[in-house]
Image (spheres, rainbow, N blue to C red):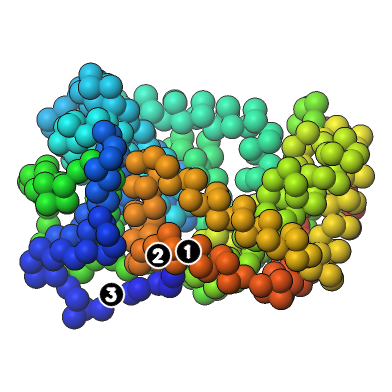
Amino acid sequence: MTANNRGPAERPARVSTRTLQDGVRLTVLPSGLRIITEAIPTTRSAALGIWVGVGSRDETPAMSGASHFLEHLLFKGTPKRTALQISAEIEAVGGETNAFTTKEFTCYYARVLDADLPLAVDVLVDAVADSILEPGDVETERGVILEEIAMHEDEPGDEVHDVFAEAIYGDHPLGRLISGTPESVTPMTRNQINNFYRKRYKAPEVIIAAAGNLDHAAVVRLVRKALAGTPLDTEPAEPAGPRPGDKRVRVRKPQTVVLHRDTEQAHIVLGTVGLSRYDDRRFALGVLNNVLGGGMSSRLFQEIREKRGLAYSVYSYASQYADSGLFGVYAGCAPGKAGEVLDLIRTELERVAESGITAEELVRGRGMAKGAYVLGLEDTGSRMSRLAKSELLYGDLMSVDELLTRVDAVTIADVGQVAADILAREQSLAVVGPFDEGAFPPG
């Protein structure tokens, strides 16, 4: 799966619809807004998502947290509905709505019974396309967000991952908090947020995805009706291609960052720069990640928890962006055991970087990757997310069989090569716990 940047010749002058896979259809409206659906007749539910290719990495330092702030505000009222009506209309039919912000996109979604999909389309499109952003609501949500930031600081197991990202990327947008900070959120004005909203939430950047017991043509009609007269009902434009990324993502020199917290546990992330989402080696990295710290049979779990009982939680993970990525190992342990745990992690990473993995581990790592993917598509919400992410991030939809084939094609040499590259890189360390700066000398 690679980026598929559409050229000017493909600018839609009218509604264009094509079938991508069995049951999956994509319609491009003249405005550049895309509607992608998957019909699953055996279900009695439907999931709807409005995905916008805007996230925290699109913000200036002064506007850090604007995407997340806006996510909160879009459920607060439109010319047609109050905040109560937005939530009550969906909940009255047993549905649910929510939203989330990432570094590269924002998603607003609803899950309802199949018969109530027309209502979900009308409500969700109204909220995302035509929000008022009342000044009073801005102040109310500012307080909510500041509490959310404070609550996050009370969760050191989560906070350490943000410390790690900052250790790698510094003041680059990929290193900043998605929520922003009190220093950026507090002075942010309603006009600044509204300008961000209207400048960034453009039809070519929007994908509306749905999966469940539905008819594609009917969904397109519902969306066009809901969009009529809103700021997303605009002149003809070309759909935005996948985010091209910045080829010069700034990365800091390897370092250790210790954040003092009076906690009962030490929270550690050791890692380095990983791969971008367009790097074909990401499949081999996924297998490597499973072998190292992807489950109870992984090397790190067996060595640190099962054999030695040094940590309750230990795992590895890979995060991928358009132009960069992270690979890290997390462990939560007693403060007095942190040094020993860190030594064990470093030893295991060095061992795999030098010697790779075994044939048995390759089979297990591939099986875990395939199983996680297929089992993750068991509900309409995950199927809807698959459609939207494929179109938004790649401009292409890889079939399940194609993806499984790519995973099966990973060889022991592929894993060894990516391990020798990623795991041999100089590493940064993030620690949150009852430690002073300087407690962890470079390894």
Residue at 46% in and 38% down: 185
- The residue wearing badge 2 is 398
User: Residue 6 got which mark?
Assistant: 3
Residue found at x 16% / y 47%: 215
Q: Marks 3/2: CA distance? A: 17 Å
* Residue 144 in the image, given as x and y percentages of width and height: 44, 26
Viewer-side label of 3, 1: 1
Residue 376 placement, left or right of 202: right
Residue 320 in the figure: left or right of residue 378: right
Q: Nearer the viewer, residue 186 or 9?
A: 9
Residue 26 percent coordinates (x, y): 22, 60
Query: Mark 1 touching mark 2, by CB under 8 A?
Result: yes
Q: Nearer the viewer, residue 293 or 13?
A: 293
Label 3 or label 2, whichever comes before in sequence order: 3
Within 10 Å of disc 1 (Cα), the crowding (few <14, some 14-19, many 20+) is some
Does the residue at mark 3 contact the one at mark 2 (Cβ under 8 Å)? Answer: no
User: Residue 183 placed where, x, y %?
Assistant: 53, 39
Q: What whole-number distance in Å separates the C-alpha atoms at marks 1 and 2?
A: 6 Å
Q: What residue type is labelled 3?
A: Arg
Mark 1 belongs to which amino acid?
Leu
Instruction: Please name the residue shown 44% across and 67% down the image.
Output: 402
Q: Name the residue under label 1.
A: 403
Q: In this view, does 410 lie above or below 203?
A: below
Q: Nearer the viewer, residue 227 or 68?
A: 227
Disc 3 from disc 1: Cα separation: 23 Å
Locate the C terminus by quadrant: bottom right
Disc 3, SS: loop
- Name the kind of residue labelled 2 in the image: Met
Of labels 3 and 2, the one closer to you: 2
